[in-house]
Amino acid sequence: MSEDVGARLAALDFASVTPEEFVRIVKGLTNKEIAALARGELRARVLAEVFGRMGRQFRPEQAGELSAVIRWRVTGESDAVYETTIADGVCTVREGAGDAEPRLTLTMNDAEFLKLVSGNGNPVTMFLTRKVKATGDLGLAAGLHRYFDIPKP
């Protein structure tokens, strides 16, 4: 990765990046570039912004009566754990593991996570090739993309 790309991304205010811009940014990065960026403060900023947007990108009309805790374990320089709780037509997000047993746990590295949440990766292919590991309710995992408004790459 060029230092120019790294410096531009490090200086980027991710809160001002639209979902469509985020999709284009991720699409333009290789796994190696994502791994290089997914360290320290920049990684924490990106993860916080992605998970912070999940509630806004949630599509309650698609979730119906769904009630579930989904634990996300993003591996990299350290494991980052977040949980999304879907209940009563609302999606809430918390950093860290809660006391409730998750209905689904998804584990993947930084690059695969960013590809998944930006729509740049095929969830079924990622699961079948073990780039994304799912434990628990695999039916929920298969339909998870329906519950969020993810721009098309």
Image: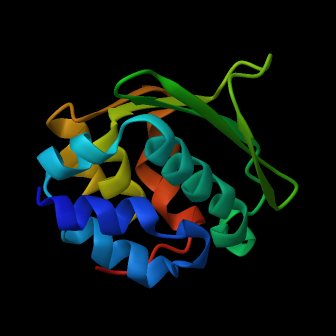
The image position of residue 8, as x and y in percent, is 33, 69
User: Does 83 sit above or below residue 86?
Assistant: above
User: Does 56 sit above or below residue 140?
Assistant: below
> Toward which corner of the image does residue 76 lie, by quadrant?
top left
In which quadrant of the rendered image does the N terminus lie?
bottom left
Q: Residue at x 72, y 62 (%)?
A: 55
In which quadrant of the rendered image does the C terminus lie?
bottom left
Q: Residue at x 45, y 47 (%)?
A: 42
Q: Nearer the viewer, residue 71 or 62?
A: 71
User: Does 124 sit above or below residue 10?
Assistant: above
> Toward which corner of the image does residue 121 lie, by quadrant?
bottom left
State left or right for residue 9 relative to residue 88.
Answer: left
Q: How many marks?
A: 0
The image position of residue 36, as x and y in percent, is 23, 42
The image position of residue 97, as x and y in percent, is 69, 22
Q: Is residue 24 visible?
A: yes
The image position of residue 80, as x and y in percent, is 52, 28
State left or right for residue 88 relative to residue 128.
Answer: right
Q: Nearer the viewer, residue 36 or 125?
A: 36
Q: Residue at x 47, y 61 (%)?
A: 145
> Toward which corner of the image does residue 110 lie, by quadrant?
top left
Q: Is residue 59 visible?
A: no
Q: Nearer the viewer, residue 81 or 147?
A: 81
State left or right for residue 66 relative to residue 40.
Answer: right
Query: Is the image coloured rainbow, by chain, by secondary structure, or in one colour?
Result: rainbow
